[in-house]
Image: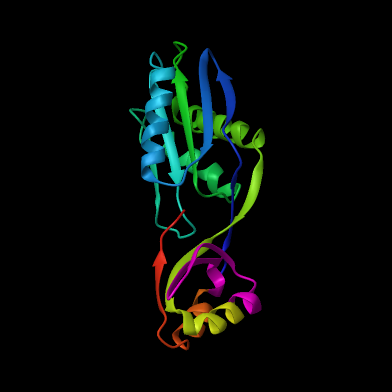
Amino acid sequence: MNDEYRTIKKESSGLYKDRGSKFIATACPVYSTEDIKNKLEQVKKKYHDARHHCYAYKLGTGEDNWRVNDDGEPSGTAGNPIMGQIKSFDLTNILIIVVRYFGGVLLGTGGLINAYRSAARDSLERSDIIKKTVMVTYGLKFPYLSMNEVMKLIKEKNLEQSEQVFELDCELKIHFRASLERNIAGRLDMISKLEYNRIDTE
């Protein structure tokens, strides 16, 4: 399994102008639909006098968590070209919003597609693209007698750990790359009287 993905480090902006119309792009890293909702509200407030606020986003490493929105532009002329740039740069956990100030001249379908694509591309060309790793967190609970086995696994697999409580009953969290999950879970199953559960993080 591939547990690495590309996203942008921080917010960036882009601009494209055509026959008086101005297209301003905002690209930002997002990790949840709540992040997306908040960012859309901020941009709509900032550019409240713009005629259109079109966007596209993609979340996670799967292929099914994405959406495009033309916000009143002719169908397929805004959201899809923006998404095309997200795919072209091979990015995820990203939202790109392009706002349009109408310049009085109709650009036609081809002109709109080019404008939204170009504004989105400009924002990505100005961004800092980084590679991140999908991490998994497990919460472990086990008796003190199982401590040696747990510590042996942690050392052997070089796992990160946090929130340790070592008493009669011990608890801690371990963090590791998603590609190791099946192997780690199999090893944990072999440790006597150990309970574990997956904790969803980013």
Establish if 105 lies above or below 36. Answer: above
In front of the other: 190 or 143: 143
In front of the other: 28 or 50: 28
Colour mapping: rainbow
Q: Is residue 177 left or right of residue 145?
A: right
Total residue callouts = 0
Where is residue 201? Give x, y as percent. 44, 56
Is residue 77 among what the camera can see? no
Q: Is residue 29 left or right of residue 41?
A: right
In front of the other: 115 or 35: 35
Q: Residue at x 40, y 53 (%)?
A: 65
Q: Residue at x 56, y 65 (%)?
A: 161
Is residue 140 among what the camera can see? yes
Q: Is residue 135 left or right of residue 141?
A: right
Q: Residue at x 66, y 39 (%)?
A: 128
Residue found at the very far left of the displayed protein: 72
Residue 119 quadrant: top right
Asked whether 169 falls inside the magenta stretch, the response is yes
In front of the other: 138 or 43: 138
Q: Residue at x 52, y 12 (%)?
A: 20
Asked whether 201 falls inside the magenta stretch, the response is no
Where is residue 114? Give x, y as percent. 54, 32
Where is residue 50? Give x, y as percent. 41, 17
Residue 71 quadrant: top left
Where is residue 35? Give x, y as percent. 41, 39
Establish if 167 lies above or below 32. Answer: below
Magenta region: 154-180
Which quadrant would the N terminus be assigned to in this image? bottom right
Residue 134 quadrant: bottom right
